[in-house]
Amino acid sequence: MSEKLTRTQQKNLERLGGVNPAEQPIPRRQFLTQLGGTAALTGAAVGAGLIIKDNWGMEGVKPPPPVRLKNYAVELLPSKPSLVVVRSNPVDSHGFASKDEELKAREDQVLKMVKAALSEMGGIERFITKGDVVVVKPNVAFDKNPDLAATTQPETVAAVVKLCLGAGARRVIVADNPINNPESCFFKTKVGDAALRAGAEVMMPQHSYFEDLYVGGETIKNTWKMFYRPFREATKVIGVSPVKDHNLCKATVTMKNWYGLLGNPRNQFHQDIHGIISDFALMMKPTFVIADGRKLLMRNGPTGGSLNDVKKADAIVVGTDCTAVDSWCVSRLLEKSRHEIIYLDKVIARGLGKDWRPQWTSEVTV
Amino acid sequence: MVKIRRAYEALFLGLFLFFLIITDLRYLRGWPVSLFLEATPLVAVSTALTTHTLYRNLVWGLVVIAITMMVGRVWCNWMCPFGILHHLFGWIGNRRNTKQMIEVNRYRKIYAIKYYILAAMLVMAGRWIVPATWAAPGDIVAAYKQSHASGVGRLTGAVGSGLSRAISESKTGSSTLQIGLLDPIALTVRSMTTSVLPTVHTATEGIYTEPREYMWGWIVGVIFVGFLVANWWIPRFFCRAICPLGALLGLFSRFSLWRIDRDPVRCTDCDLCLKSCEGASDPQGDLRKSECFVCLNCIEDCPHDALAFRFLPRKASEVTYPQVGRRQLMMAGLFGLLFYPMTRQSGLVKKNFNKAVIRPPGSVAEDEFLRRCIKCDQCIRVCPTNVLQPAMFEAGLEGLWTPIMVSKMGWCELNCTLCSQVCPTGAIREISIAEKLGTGPFEAKGPIKTGTAFYNQGRCLPWAMDTSCVVCEEVCPVSPKAIFTRNVEVTSRWGETLELKRPFIDPVKCIGCGICEHECPVKDDPAVYVTAIGETRDKSRSLLLSLVEDPQAQELVSV
Amino acid sequence: MNPMKDTFIHLRDLYRSSPIMAVSLIAAAVAFASTPLAFALMGRMKWFNARRGRTLLRPAFWSVVCSMILVMTIPAFILALLVKSEHFDENRYAFDPNRTISPIDQGRQYEARTLLDSVQKLDEGVRAEQERLAAIRKDLVDSVKKLDTAMLALRESARQAPAVIPPMNEVLERMGGIRKAVGLDAPQQVTNLKYDPTAMTANAPGTTSPIAASPVPQPTAPVAVATNGLSRPEIDAILATVPEPQKPLAVMLPLSDLPPGWVMSKIPGKAASPYVETFNAENLYEKMDGRAESFIQNGVKGMACCSYHPKGNEESEIQLFVFEMGNSLKARGKFDSEKPDEAKPTAIGEGAYTAAGSVFVHADKYYTIVNVAQDEPKLAEFALDLAKRVAALQKSTKSSGPTAQDLFNLFPAEPKRSGTKYVAQDVFGYSFLSDVFIADYKSGDVEFQGFLRPYASAEEAKKVFETYVDTARKDGAVLKTIDDSKADKMVMSSNIGMFDVIFLKGNAVGGSNGASDAKPAEALAREFAKSLPANVPVIEPDKKSVPAEGGADAEKQEK
């Protein structure tokens, strides 16, 4: 208080007890905490800012590292056939007391057929081991009744699921990204219901379930958004597809079935349909595939819509190579010449698959 | 000290106006014209929230944060051009006597509004935390299962990688950046660009070579003028009550080591310090630290030298935290939380994307764009052809005043990347001309496309009216031309044979620059027009399979 | 040069280019430098003394220093900005196409700085390569332009010669591909003109060119030539379009002198060579519905084909295919593998049969198929005639070595030997077993196969034998060694109800395969081992033959 105080100021001083609090030295402890706190926080703020600094705006828009699909194939014994055709007379729809009974009979028959085919190839144990997480990929692209043969037959899906669970699979996930509304598709094709009853989970696509998947092929040179979520944990993959006509690529069997994993805008792939289908042979190495040739959509594919387009047959084809299965199905079931199917030629020319050979095939009748 | 402050105010306002004028192809050179936009910490903080990165020069925002944490909100009265403008306007319109001045500069409850605005906007920007929290436990468990480490390392590693996975997964498509609506710098630049400068130009003809026109620019102007005039009602109304940047700095200034301190002995409670207090921070009592603009006027005004700017004064004589109502804050947060899902109802980002939302070249994909763009319209300022226009609701409520290309107004100049150069936040990523044209090292990637042109054959002269034209082919800037013609011979109305060249588009070559639309003689509804489909910034909007962008190609330098 | 002078020169240049910049630079620098001086002076002259109460006080030393720093910051800031404004990417404003802008020039790359050097080096290389490619591209474009001009004249003269028109059209079509690759627009008048041969002859009746007088290849216009079929010039024109490797094959096709009533069928969509198609191993699949694979396994080199039909009846078509296989053995192998059960042997070439009217011939390394659409005597007769004509041209280059027939003669005739065949690859599904001679046997109800594979050396044979045994064991077969004095080793393997017997004798591996009963399989193997000479003649799959001692024996046996 070097300078002279006015009267008011002197009163103030008296009121404060003769000590000017503003001139009191601050406690050492407060000094240190305040200084240190500010320094630390400033440092932290600036440091954090510098850590996330992005010089060219590229880090922010960099896509996450692409995922790759595993190879889900299993090695077969050389003496075993890699393609098995099971034939069995279709269940006669008459002579059953109720619809349920007929369904039951059909399911039992399919179960027997698939089982027979697999045991011909070395048994289901060869493919599915205890604790496996199996993804079953049916083709439920359209919300149509299964009798129209535009989608996978529900009994076949149920049979595969039951066999997998019976062989000790921990989880079986049935997943597809249909063209029509997913809920409606799984409901009307009866695949959803069949899968659930057989004990599988049904996984429908959601926006967040799609991830960039590396393919590195001919049409997808790098990555594409794929319905990847079901494959995250998967150890085995089984494709179950119908056998049907397709207006553009001429046949939809096991290979085209993987189209259902593509995310949007997949409609662009119709600009190069054969290229994309042959890329699937590179992308996906399934454990095995099943082509359900009990109902064939002979024309107006891939949607069909009339029972006139459907032909009843008696075969289920099980194989480890999509190429061979497709080749067999188009020539033996769809009554098309093998050369019409350009994507198969492409796959073979690229060395991604082998055409069907009689010596690796066996036919069984149940 | 007040004189020094005035020098700074003059310097920064002058610099701001100088930068505004030279944001022009003729003068731009290497001037850091977006310096002010890059220095607002609000942009740095909120874009860091939405993008998890800090784009280049936004580090200047960190400098301002550091300064604020040392000496308080000096930004508001020393550097902020909008604040300085308000200061100036308040001074010009001041007709109050000393007593009225003292009364009008007291703190009012409404000054807490800015904190609610800030809270709402930051919640919008940080909304990804919600889905990330949902996803985190699952991701942590998954990471734990995949991990090969053991013991504590496994657990911490799993928590770390699981968290980062959850965060990066929920980054896209769950937050939006609306800070630019009220950020003072973005607001000023936008107002200047779309309304003040064009208005000044019509009076002086000295700013542009050719007058600029901006649809709905007057709305921006009215808001701007409204905020300035509000100073005559309450001085620094915007700064005290609205400014979210001020609110953010108010939070940071809580740590400041220096502040104004009142000597309770020397003070005679004359309240003269309030006479020209800018921030309404109550220096006559316990200082509201978060409100003080550090204008230092009170020190000069005090007749008894009772006020001083001191290092670490007593804690007891300050109001450290801003006074906000918890309920209001929660309401503001809730609004911020719901705003994003509400605006995305429009579907304009994904399925229902608008054909008119043609973003300038170098723009990132729409979702990312809306998480980066602060609507400062600096790109619109620098665009030499007037093609860039502030959007109204074309890009949805979120995209208000974001830049879109309206080809009737101009066209995207082929050898020009100025908008990408000035963008402060990387919503338009900085690109080179080589990258835009897809030459040199970018040969494999191809040119950057902003859209694709289409013909309306019913309005096209050679198609519908037997008249030769093809101006569009002539002006098409790419090589080889994206517009090609086919010769046809038609019989005219009078029976003569006419040879016509009919134009077609090659979608592989078209980059969507819009010069064809701009030059089309059918002016009102051009016979050739550009829509957003085929833009390269988003894979899902490509038109042709062959042009789907290769994401890894950008990473390669040139090998 | 001393640095002072350098700086001076630099400043002088700057002044000359932009005086305002230079002046402001100098002013800012002077202001910056003089501020401390001014502060020191003014502080001494009591300029900074502040009022405190009623007295003037000297301010604290530190507050003077702070003010000085604040003041000095202003010119420093301006200086920094001025310097920054001179550093910019000139290329952004004046894009120079001659200079490839590397991403590093543009500051585009964002990798770690340590990578910079190596990236720069790589970039140099890439830039050089790009320059080279750009030069090539320019040359290419120029050449195509010149070619277009030259083609105009050629096209005009082609108008006069109908035989040239189809290949000419083909050439014009191919030019489109070249133009697409180099990005050059087509001159409209070149590609727009499509010729129809009949229309052209009608258009140009008055031309006196000698070529124009040659007959038009239409069945309705049998002009000058007396015999049926194509004329010599036509055949020459067709042969000219055939790729060189397939020429010898195409020559074999009978195109002229057809019996009356028969005409060649046109292939739709092939303008250049409307009657003959040729393929090599790579594109064989285009013609052969899925059978191409099996031809490739047998080393197909090429194929030529054409088809015929009776005049006015295009339904009953006859297709003629001539394949050139890897060697005569492969031809034989393919021939055998396609032989159906109901084949009727015929004496053409080195072996032939007819089945349902179609004729299959193999001679030397050629395999000829004449397919008839309907099993009618008239068609079959012509098919046989065609096959003979083709086979006559396939002169066997008879060598001294053993033929496949020699080896088949080594097989035991009993029990009931039926077909014999040669299989090139993956015999019985085993990848290691190839080039095997197989005969079918039937004993009672049991059908099975005997096989024989001679190797160049005994060691090789032994190795294959062991591989076979190992593989069988791995597959879970039950193995039983059979004692047989004639064979070196003999093993029976039984798996899934099938019995195979395999033996090793000298340089050969043989045995029986696929019997459902053990007895006949073993019997055949014993018999086979007994009858086999100690050294079996070898036909190396790639070389024509290797003379072996046993060859003479075999021939003797044959007689």
Image (cartoon, coloured by chain):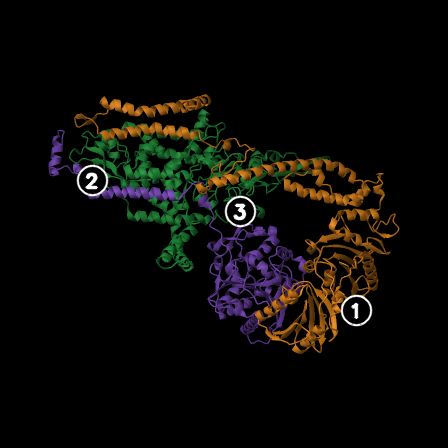
Marks 1/2: CA distance?
Answer: 125 Å
From the image, state the color of chain A: purple
Marks 3/2: CA distance?
Answer: 61 Å
Q: Are marks 3 and 1 in contact (CB under 8 Å)?
A: no
Going 52% across and 36% down the picture, which residue do you hit?
C101
Nearer the camera: disc 3 or disc 1: 1
Image quadrant in which the C terminus of chain C is located = bottom right
The disc at residue A324 is none
Q: Does residue C508 appear anywhere in the picture?
A: yes
| B201 versus A279 height, above or below | above
Disc 2 secondary structure class = loop
From the image, state the color of chain C: orange
Q: Nearer the viewer, residue C533 or A274?
A: C533
Question: Badge 3, how many Cα within 10 Å: few under 14, some, many 20+?
Answer: some
Q: Which residue is identified by label 2?
A: B314
Disc 3 secondary structure class = loop
Q: Earlier in the sequence, mark 3 or mark 2?
A: 2
From the image, state the color of chain B: green
Q: Nearer the viewer, residue C3 or A113?
A: C3
Q: Which residue is identified by label 1?
A: C556
Q: Nearer the viewer, residue B355 or B93?
A: B355
Q: Amino acid at mark 1?
A: Lys
The disc at residue B550 is 3
